[in-house]
Amino acid sequence: MAVWDAREQLLTGFGITLRLTLVAAVAALVLGTVLGAMRVSPIPPLRWLGTAYVELVRNTPLTLVFFFMVFVAPRLDIILEFRTSAYIALSVYTAAFVCEAVRSGINSVSTGQAEAARAVGMTFGQNLRLVVLPQAMRSVIPTLVNIFVALTKNSSVAAGFFVGELFGLGRTLAIRNPAEGVAMLCGVAVLYLIITIPSGVLAERLERKVAIAR
Amino acid sequence: MTAPVDEEPRAAVGEPLVVLDGVNKWYGDLHVLRDINLSVARGEVVVVIGPSGSGKSTLCRAINRLETIGDGTISIDGEPLPEEGKALARLRADVGMVFQAFNLFAHKTILENVTLGPIKVRKQKKADAEERARELLDRVGVGHQADKYPAQLSGGQQQRVAIARALAMEPKVMLFDEPTSALDPEMIKEVLDVMVDLAKRGMTMIVVTHEMGFARTAGDRVVFMSDGQIVEENTPEEFFTNPQSDRAKDFLGKILKH
Ligand SMILES: Nc1ncnc2c1ncn2[C@@H]1O[C@H](COP(=O)(O)OP(=O)(O)OP(=O)(O)O)[C@@H](O)[C@H]1O
Ligand SMILES: [Mg+2]
């Protein structure tokens, strides 16, 4: 059977997708949290910058972000490999959503918490890092998981930019074996599920583990 | 005749520690603090009392700049309140605050609640901070709850932890904004007892409360506020038995009836 024969190629694609997703997830989490902090910062220019970023990126189709990375960036003398461009495009795009999740998480933490932290003499950064974000993050775990599941699927856009990730390889294989095309794509779908379903389960566990009694 | 003795350098009791000078604050058109002049001496316990909406909380929160003021100046230990930033954070570390809603850090244990400020703000060693925290928790009677989370404690216990958390910073002055008004009656006393003890130990305190018992036992002075103004100031005994202004009489009439 062709799917089985192509297993090595499919697994290579799977590996690349997994790596794209994980790297972009970590980068987006960091960037998104920084942006979220900017959006609640007492310094207006930082707030504006954060807002501008979110509005711009969130309302742009991901494909366009990829286009920008692959075709526009070189004109600005930024020459990157396709693979690197894919990492950056996915991280930049996902960060906008992480930012909004983090911001809503921050808003869900009662103002008394931040006030108490200010009253013991914490700076804005300490307050955020030690008191507000740890509580905010717990309440946004479900939203973050949705974002990362979307990211996993979004990574398939990279196929359009010559990154041989799971979807790209699967499609190539399907075209090469039209008779088994459907089976091939089903195999691809299963491999995506192998990433997304466990992350949901993991998140549920995590959520229960870090839940704060109130 | 007494032989001349080497006088100990006098502890600075009595010199002004918190000084508000011509303080005004507006919320839009609402004038919530009107020309407030108040000087609190080191070691003094000032009780702030007044009807709802008279500006007591605003006054209390202005002193550690949780609220900014419109004009006038506030200084603590001779130092005017700085703008938001590192200097203000440093100054706030010297001003303990106890909130009506306790506001313990929900994701931290009781012990961590008390050690977080000393470790992160005062840069104390963890072991030292924990030792001191345990002493303070014992002192306020919740030593055996150190490893629990705030939500597992009663309101009275939480408020005592909040007092310990503030004390761990070795503050120069403590602000209390209605510390017992969110508590069930049977828990009020345990919190007031801790506060009375604190007053006896010489802590400078500004306390917004309607607990007359506390004002009488621990207060040096009562400040009565109405409509954003300080209407009357007196010793607790004089204020409660012989109020001067009509507004104070009216107010006392209402709270005594209940
Ligand atoms: N953030 C705010 N925005 C607008 N108005 C406010 C705000 N906070 C307080 N006020 C108003 O300022 C006035 C003083 O409020 P404050 O909370 O200081 O009163 P209080 O004496 O503490 O009352 P209470 O006994 O009810 O706690 C009130 O009229 C209140 O409605
Ligand atoms: Mg109040």
Image (cartoon, coloured by chain):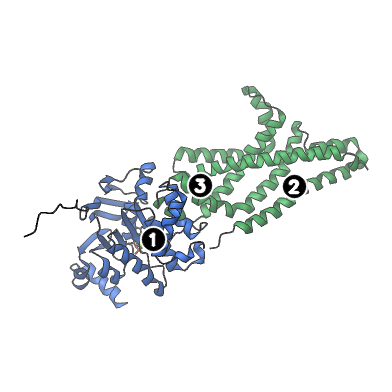
Disc assigned to residue B163: 1
Residue A141 screen position, x and y as percent: 62, 52
Above or below for B196 versus A103: below
Which chain does blue denote in the image? B
Above or below for A1 versus B17: above
Could you tell whether B79 is left or right of A189 in the image? Answer: left
The answer to whether mark 3 and mark 2 are in CB contact below 8 A is: no
Mark 2 CB near ligand 1 (8 Å cut): no
Could you tell whether A29 is left or right of A12 in the image? Answer: left
- Chain holding disc 1: B
Disc assigned to residue A195: 2
Disc assigned to residue A145: none
Disc assigned to residue A129: 3
Q: Around disc 2, counting alpha carbons within 10 Å, would you say few (fewer than 14), some (14 to 19), or many (20 or more)?
A: some
Say what secondary structure mark 2 lies in.
Answer: helix
Locate ligand 2 by image quadrant.
bottom left
In this view, the residue in front, A150 or A71, is A150
Could you tell whether A95 is left or right of B251 in the image? Answer: right
- Chain holding disc 3: A
Residue type indicated by callout 2:
Ile
Residue type indicated by callout 3:
Arg
Of marks 3 and 2, which one's residue comes earlier in the chain? 3
Residue B258 screen position, x and y as percent: 32, 77
Chain A tint as drawn? green
The residue at 9%/56% (across/down) is B3
For the residues marked 1 and 2, what is the alpha-carbon distance in whole angstroms? 48 Å
